[in-house]
Image (spheres, helix red, strand yellow):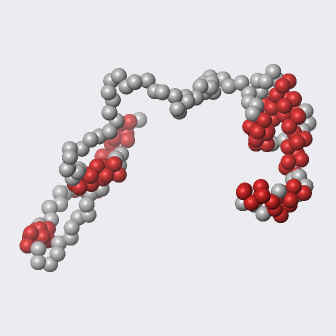
Amino acid sequence: VDPVCRVLELSPSTYFARRTRPKSARRLRDEELIPMVTAAWEDSGRTYGVRRVTRALVRAGHAVARCTVERLMRELGIEGVIRGQRRRTTVPEPTAPRPPDLVNRRFTAEARPGTRPSRSRLRRAHSARRTAGRRQRRPPRRRPQPGDTTARVAVARTRTAAPLPRQPNIATTQPAASLYSAERSSAGRRR
């Protein structure tokens, strides 16, 4: 045992402790559930998935969680019938020869020798990506600083602008008695 532990870089005490350690409660429960899960799956004609196997076990009076059945079925390598898209069974061999490229596809962008994309172009591309789908924020309005001639003129114009004359309100220019009589006469006509 010592040479094997040395190769695996384990201490021999770890090996012996693991060997003599009793099985955990989870492992004992799994050993109890594995025959029940496989029996429920076989009884369904190997068609039930995780949820149906779980429901079948609960109907039979066994308290079991769906995640436990899922884990056990994954360990056992069993699964239910899959509707719709089938599981992928053909996996390409990575060392197999590939068919020739008959249309001469190039998947690289070659730059002219001695050139690089300009920094401003890269900056624009980055900001366009960052602000895609959002409204552009307006830059904050600049407050006039002391010494600005154009700002001083604009401020002076806003201060000296005369207020607009008020328009008289037509409804309030009539005497109160005539308003009251107009209401009474219109109310009488409605009846």
Q: Residue sitting at 53 percent across and 33 percent down?
A: 94
Q: Residue sitting at 81 percent across and 21 percent down?
A: 45
Residue farthest along the bottom direction in this orientation = 146
Q: Quadrant of the N terminus?
A: bottom right
Q: Quadrant of the C terminus?
A: top left
Percent of width and height locating residue 99:
43, 23
Residue farthest along the front direction in this orientation = 3
Q: Residue sitting at 74 percent across and 37 percent down?
A: 74
Question: Is residue 73 shown to the viewer in this render?
Answer: no
User: In the figure, residue 160 lies in which quadrant?
Assistant: bottom left
* Front residue of this view, candidates 190 and 121: 121
In the visual, does 42 lie left or right of 116? right
In the visual, does 66 lie left or right of 186? right
Percent of width and height locating residue 185:
33, 42
Q: Residue sitting at 37 percent across and 25 percent down?
A: 101
Percent of width and height locating residue 158:
14, 68
In the visual, does 158 lie left or right of 70? left
Question: Is residue 36 shown to the viewer in this render?
Answer: yes
